[in-house]
Amino acid sequence: MTEAVRQPPRRRLALWAGWLLAMAAVTIVLRVTREAADLSHVELVYLLLVLGASATGGGAIGVVMAAASVACIDFFFQEPFDLISVDKRVDMLVLVTFLLTAMVATALLTRARRQAAEARRSAADARRFADEAARAEAAAEASRLKELTLAAMSHDLRTPLTSISAHAQALAAAGDPAGVTIAEQAALLSRLVEDALGFVETDIGTQARDVEVNTADDVIGALVRQTRPLLEGKHLVVDIGSADQPLLGRFDFVQTLRILTNLVENALRYTAAGGSADVAVAAVGGWLQFTVADRGPGIAPSEAEAVFTPFYRGGSRPAGRSGLGLAVARRLATVQGGTLTHASRPGGGTVFTLRLPPAGGTE
Amino acid sequence: MSYAESILVIEDDERIREIVVSALRDVARVVRGVATASDALASIRAEPPGLVVLDLGLPDADGGDTCRRIRELSGAPIVVLSARHQEAEKVALLNAGADDYVAKPFSLPEFVARVLAQLRRANMYGSGRPERLALGDLVIDLDRRTAARAGEPIRLTPVEWNLLRVLAAQPGRTFTHQQLFHAAWGKTYGDAQQHLRVHITHLRRKIERNPADPELIVTEPGVGYRCEAPPTGGHVSDP
């Protein structure tokens, strides 16, 4: 019986002992008064005991109690008394009726108990599911709230910047030198805001969003276009390889473009006027590997990992930057299952290497 | 010199509206500025503009809805301005009928150039479907389905031809990946949509002077592609 199994053993033992003792007590009492009692009264009392046992202890105890009751009734309360005998003037009909009633009642009670237990279990499951759903919804709500805050923040920061830079550009176009300065500073501020917003965004979104089949050509072309305003008399030398077939990868285009833009911006910062930053792409062991190299002072071994921490400012860094570019780049690379590392460049300078996982999948 | 009879600027921030309106004064004979979507719709009904500049942060209506409602009233090019740089939002707006999207804070010359590109295209359409399109020294013959650079024929696959034809027919319009895919393939072939970018890359290697620095087909990251070269020999030129 499944119900009996589910009860703790000590409690089960106590139930069996309790009901069997009760039956013994009842039998003694009835035995003392048997001359005054009618057989049908005796049977009713036993029936009550069987029902009680089934209701609290389950089917097994009910069956045993019913069998014991039949034995007791036969032995003590059917003439000739105190004798087990098939020759008794037995009221067979009464005994069979008793047994059937006890069995049917036991079966019904057992089923009712099982259904009640199932109902309790489903109620518990429903509560657990409701709890889980509520927790998931709370998490989604928190993330939605963060995104809304970010969207509002970006709107509130970009709107005045739009106004400032548009007016400054108009002044600059009219030949006002102050307009030129304001426009330059507004552009710098815009880049800092984008850095900061990008950093917060990577904090919220911990996954690559649109990983699709992309070509290295395409992301490099967008990179060249996007970094053109940053050149200021410096050059970006790009090598997309000489293969007939474009290099393919499965990566998030926007995130990868942001990584490369940050790396190029960083490289240009350490490039003298007239000098160049070099970007190249190659397939290395199935991975797509982008390199961005500069001829700057290089990165001291003691700073190797520190340059990737947010707001880190090395001693040799020019002022006026957020210190977030490389931190964002590292995060976006990791999120796509890729790596971002750097090494000394032969002949002086630094090479940053972005590796993105093999295309695989649909190719 | 003006390229359009009138332009409508919908922008709730007064300072930005002023600067946008004044930047476009050389472009159109009349530039009107309104602050709300309802004023904009009323203005479009009263006097249909040749181009609409729509800011997305309007106080009285959702940007996508406004875009759709303008599209119902007018076929004029819509250039969207937005301070929220979500690629999904850009895609939704372009799919809702916008022609181009400029992120705030924008560079004024670039913004004006994007508006001019839209007006050129609108003018191009005004004179009927052209037989030939010229992008720099690239000539596309729509009737013969051929392309040539400086007289040298370029061999294109059917998919590359379709992509070039669709993009070049509407220079300045930013097509979403989905729009380009439907235009070039006609219907959805499941995974094939992923290879749109590969076909664009092959096309660029055939038509661009420097595929690493494309000038004719420009990538709008996370959104789609745009043909950017001004058609030469047309009846409009840059100021």
Image (cartoon, coloured by chain):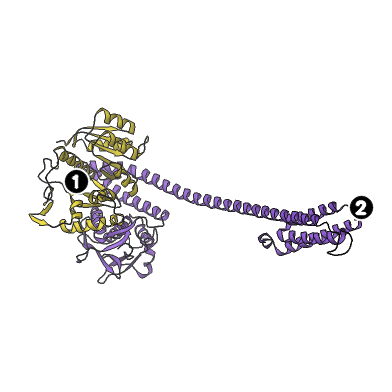
- The residue that appears at 42% across and 53% down in the rendered structure is A204
Instruction: Classify mark 1: helix, strand or loop.
Output: loop
Tag 2: residue type? Answer: Ala
User: Between residues A155 and B76, which one lies in front from this camera angle?
Assistant: B76
- The residue that appears at 41% across and 54% down in the rendered structure is A205
User: Between residues A306 and B59, which one lies in front from this camera angle?
Assistant: B59
Q: Is residue B156 left or right of residue A267?
A: left
Chain designation of label 2: A
User: Between residues B179 and A263, which one lies in front from this camera angle?
Assistant: B179
Tag 1: residue type? Answer: Pro
Q: Chain B: give its colour.
A: yellow
Residue B17 x, y percent position in the rendering: 29, 36
Instruction: Classify mark 2: helix, strand or loop.
Output: loop
Rendered view: B128 above or below A201: above
Query: Would you identify the image quadrant in which residue B60 lies?
Result: top left
Query: Would you identify the image quadrant in which residue B92 lies?
Result: top left
Which of the labelled discs sits on residue A36, or is there none?
A: 2
Residue reaching furthest top?
B46
Residue reaching furthest left?
B151
Q: Does the image show residue B36?
A: no
Chain designation of label 1: B
In 3D space, how far apart are the residues under numbered discs 1 and 2 (Cα atoms)? Answer: 113 Å
Residue A283 x, y percent position in the rendering: 27, 68
Which residue bears the numbered disc 1? B171
- The residue that appears at 22% across and 37% down in the rendered structure is B24
Crowd around label 1: few <14 · some 14–19 · many ≥20 (10 Å): many
Residue B238 x, y percent position in the rendering: 14, 43
